Image (spheres, rainbow, N blue to C red):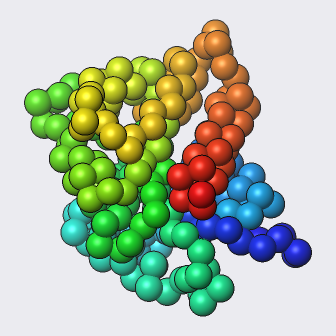
Amino acid sequence: MPAGVVPVAVLLLGHGAGGGVETHDIAALAAGLPAQGVEVVRLEQPWRVAGRKVASAPPTLDVALRLAVAGLPGVLRDVPLVLGGRSAGARSAARCAAELGAAGLVLLAFPLHPPGKPERSRRDELAGALGAGVPALVVQGENDAMGRAEEVAAAFTGEAGEGLDLVVVPGADHGLKVPKRAPLTMEDVRALVVESALEWIVREAVG
């Protein structure tokens, strides 16, 4: 947090199974939000710290998330806690949000299903958080192989979608990366992620 900036919220972000906390979207949030009063804490899962190439099972990921929340410094315990992350990190945040008292969720590339297997839906993980009254922002690529933005929208229609805000990244894949001829540049994508998250956190979590 820059000197002189008083935190109004903390965003704890977990990474996905294919990379660490250095991914472009997580890095953009860590660079852009603290100056606006949102402290960003990045959780590097133990399997990554140990140098392993295969992610741990979901219950193990959730244990690490709980420990990270418990270890937050005192100054961050008095502001709203927003959980989030990308892909597997987004799933873990959704699973743990209610029990950890999260004020909201910021989910990047929520993996609604494995690639090519829409019948193996993970909808219930996010639905559980929403049903417990935890609002969520989902930033989803238009062409995400693990759940296109339109699939996420279709999975949470009507009352099931109460508390859910969806931001679509045109032309983006699961990594929130876009081809050269896409309507947005990668710089545009990162700006969209940061601006959407900031506006949503201030509105929904800080109030």
| Front position in the image: 73 or 21 | 73
Residue furthest bottom in the image: 74
Query: Hey, which residue is sitting farthest top in the picture?
Result: 181
Quadrant containing the C terminus in the rendered view: bottom right
Q: Is residue 21 at all visible to an observer of this figure?
A: no
Q: Return the residue nearer the eye: 22 or 193.
A: 193
- When the figure is inspected, residue 81 is found, relative to residue 184, above or below; the finding is below
Residue 33 place in picture, x, y as percent: 71, 56
What's the residue at 17%, 28% (across, down)? 118
* Residue 2 horizontal side relative to residue 39, left or right: right
Q: Quick check: 109 above or below 58?
A: above
In this rendered view, identify the residue nearer to me: 197 or 27. Answer: 197
Residue at image location 78% in from the left, 73% down from the top: 6
Q: Residue furthest left?
A: 119
Q: Quadrant of residue 144?
A: top left
Left or right: where does residue 7 sit relative to residue 93? Answer: right
- Which residue is nearer to you in this view: 20 or 5? 5
Name the side, left or right, on which 192 lies relative to 54: right
